[in-house]
Image: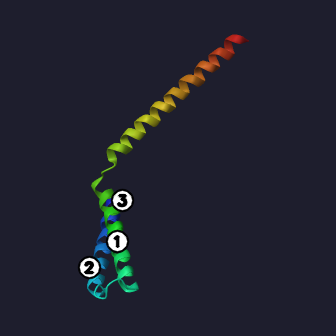
Amino acid sequence: MKGFRNVVFMSMALGMLFYSVPQLEFREGWSLEMIFSIVWIGMALLVVAAHLHHILGVDEEKRKELNRINRMKKWQMEQTLQGRRKMLYFRK
């Protein structure tokens, strides 16, 4: 369901971009309108790129590796705590 939501939002951003680009001003040199147009297009492309990045699952391997590391840290912490409990038990 998450992938579908990202596809919908990316499609909306692309539609908004295709609708607005012909109406933006690029003719008058470095005016406020041109600066706004460039920044607006950049932000829209950033939104599209973020959704595309998530749809393609580029960081899925990184997420799996982080999950593996976190599981190992939890296991090590459990082993450390169990070792301390045993030491406290034998001291009594």
Q: Which of the two marks, 1 or 2, is nearer to us in this view?
A: 1
Residue at mark 1: 42
Q: Secondary structure at mark 1?
A: helix
Q: Is residue 1 visible?
A: no
Give whichever of discs 3 and 1 has the lower sequence position.
Answer: 3
Q: Quadrant of the N terminus?
A: bottom left
Q: Secondary structure at mark 3?
A: helix
Q: What is the x, y in percent for residue 85?
A: 64, 20
Q: What is the x, y in percent for residue 73?
A: 49, 32
Residue at mark 2: 18
Q: What is the x, y in percent for residue 6?
A: 34, 64
The image quadrant of residue 13 is bottom left
Q: Is residue 12 left or right of residue 73?
A: left
Q: Which of the two marks, 3 or 1, is nearer to us in this view?
A: 1
Instruction: Find the distance from the CA under tag 1 to the CA under tag 2.
Output: 13 Å
The image quadrant of residue 53 is bottom left
Residue at mark 3: 2
User: Do callouts 2 and 3 mark residues in contact (Cβ within 8 Å)?
Assistant: no
Q: Is residue 78 above or below residue 5?
A: above
Instruction: Find the distance from the CA under tag 3 to the CA under tag 1.
Output: 25 Å
Q: Residues within 10 Å of mark 1 (few under 14, many from 20)?
A: few
